[in-house]
Image (cartoon, helix red, strand yellow):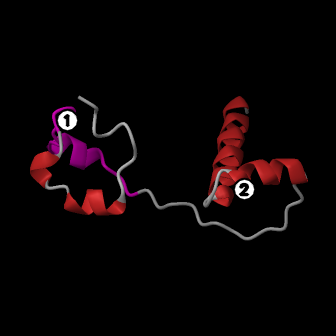
């Protein structure tokens, strides 16, 4: 039998999924200790910039479809984190 999650679910499939259909067995219980140590993490704000990128690089990202700027930002952020770990 084909695993129904081999392919990403569509928005309609997600909306049609009931709580009973979701496997929560690998999700740990959130006890009082978890909530005592929890902290709010606000997402970083984005800032518009003008950036010169090689045409070939931009074409590769655009060819992957919608969200190419988000993917480019994720790569830059990942690299930036390696730089802060070195210091």
- What's the magenta bit mostly, secondary-structure-wise? loop
SS for callout 2: helix
Q: Is residue 83 left or right of residue 44?
A: right
Above-or-below relation of 34 to 85: below
- Residue 42: x percent and y percent? 47, 61
Q: Nearer the viewer, residue 36 or 18?
A: 18
In magenta, the rendered stretch is: 24-40
**What residue is drawn where x is 89% and y is 54%?**
55
**What residue is drawn where x is 17% and y is 39%?**
23
- The residue under label 1 is 28
- Residue 65: x percent and y percent? 63, 56
Which of the two marks, 1 or 2, is nearer to us in this view?
A: 2
User: In the picture, which quadrant includes the C terminus?
Assistant: top right
User: In the picture, which quadrant includes the N terminus?
Assistant: top left
- Residue 59: x percent and y percent? 80, 53
Crowding near pointer 1: few (<14 within 10 Å), some, many (20+)?
few
Crowding near pointer 2: few (<14 within 10 Å), some, many (20+)?
some
Cα–Cα gap, marks 1 and 2 = 38 Å
1 or 2: tag closer to the N-terminus = 1
SS for callout 1: loop
What label does residue 19 carry, if any? none
- Residue 63: x percent and y percent? 71, 52
The residue at the far left in this view is 20
The residue at the far front in this view is 1
**What residue is drawn where x is 35% and y is 51%?**
9
Above-or-below relation of 51 to 32: below
Q: Nearer the viewer, residue 5 or 33?
A: 5
- What is the quadrant of residue 51 in the picture? bottom right
- Magenta segment includes 6: no
- The residue under label 2 is 62
Q: Is residue 37 left or right of residue 81?
A: left
Above-or-below relation of 27 to 12: above
């Amino acid at each position: 039998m084909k695993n129904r999650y081999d392919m990403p679910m569509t928005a309609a499939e997600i909306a049609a999924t009931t709580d009973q259909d979701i496997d929560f067995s690998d999700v740990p219980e959130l006890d009082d200790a978890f909530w005592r140590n929890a902290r709010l993490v606000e997402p970083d704000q984005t800032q518009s910039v003008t950036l010169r990128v090689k045409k070939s690089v931009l074409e590769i990202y655009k060819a992957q479809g919608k969200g190419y700027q988000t993917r480019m930002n994720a790569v830059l952020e990942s690299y930036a984190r390696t730089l802060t770990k070195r210091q």
